[in-house]
Image (tube, helix red, strand yellow):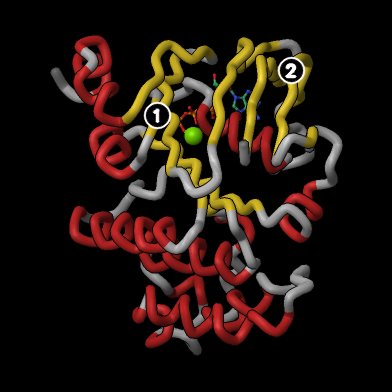
Amino acid sequence: MLLSVKNLHVKYGNIEALHGISFDVEEGEIVTLIGANGAGKSTTLHTITRLPPPDGPRVTQGDILFKGQSILHTPPHKIVSDLHITLAPEGRRIFGNLTVLENLTLATYARKDRDRIHGDLQRVFELFPRLEERSKQRSESLSGGEQQMLAVGRALMSGSRFLLLDEPSMGLAPLLMFEKFRTLKRLNEEGLSILLIEQNARIALKFAHRGYVLDTGEIVAQGTSEQLANDPDVKKAYLGG
Ligand SMILES: Nc1ncnc2c1ncn2[C@@H]1O[C@H](COP(=O)(O)OP(=O)(O)OP(=O)(O)O)[C@@H](O)[C@H]1O
Ligand SMILES: [Mg+2]
């Protein structure tokens, strides 16, 4: 198993946000966690990557295993550099006053496989031609959708083999959103494993192999995307009937 979350309890201060959730992701899979506002989706991702650190979520019980080893005490930078797990978009990690190319290059700082960097940059430009066209442009002048592409591009440049996506559909016009999901699907077919967090259950269940439904800090349903999409309760609560 690539990722195994086991009976995870997480608190912010004294308030428990995750009440013992369990789920897993196999190598090569796309797994989605769907749920309404405040369900605990971002909390789950931030607990795995330990970002953002200062007053972030605190694990009080349970475990997170990556390839069978607990990563609860792995320093956040090692999660990126050694385990190749990346969270996107990480708005805070895009440097607005740097160019697109500078942002992509900066993402490679912790990589040990330096010889693969050039090929990965070609790959990012092939996947997102718009980033190549704008490579010399300051990142803050990109549109919201282009900034999201840059966030995924940065994740790939960091050498990530496991991508955690927080609401990649947010703020994107339908055309750009479908294009982005197609790109991500291609990356998955090439071996990238993906944990996708989405409020948009309809697109998440089209894209993912399997999913879990998170409701106020608890997993209330799970199954293949097809099973979930046909589940009457899921339909009613998340798919508009
Ligand atoms: N830094 C924080 N301090 C205290 N409580 C927090 C913090 N971040 C999140 N919470 C609370 O934890 C719960 C889960 O929030 P979380 O951001 O994980 O939800 P979400 O499922 O990602 O929602 P959304 O779809 O709106 O992004 C919410 O009740 C939220 O108010
Ligand atoms: Mg969120």
Q: Residue at position x 62%, y 36% from top?
A: 1
Q: Residue furthest left?
A: 241
Q: Identify which amino acid the numbered label 2 is placed on.
A: Gly
Q: Identify which amino acid the numbered label 1 is placed on.
A: Gly
The answer to whether 234 is drawn above or below residue 34 in the figure is above
Identify which residue, 66 or 56, lies in the foreground.
66
- x, y (%) of residue 152? 49, 62
- x, y (%) of residue 45? 59, 37
Which quarter of the image is occupied by the C terminus?
A: top left
Q: Which residue is mark 1?
A: 211
What is the crowding at mark 1: few (fewer than 14 residues within 10 Å), some, or many (at least 20)?
many
Q: Residue at position x 69%, y 73% from top?
A: 108
The answer to whether 201 is drawn above or below residue 7 in the figure is below
- x, y (%) of residue 124? 47, 76
Which numbered disc covers residue 62? 2
- x, y (%) of residue 36? 38, 23
Cα–Cα span, label 2 and label 1? 21 Å
| Secondary structure under the numbered disc 1 in the rendered image | strand
What is the crowding at mark 2: few (fewer than 14 residues within 10 Å), some, or many (at least 20)?
some
The first of marks 2 and 1 along the sequence is 2
Q: Is mark 2 within 8 Å of ligand 1?
A: no
Which numbered disc covers residue 87? none
Q: Residue at position x 72%, y 33% from top?
A: 65
Is residue 241 shown left or right of residue 74? Answer: left
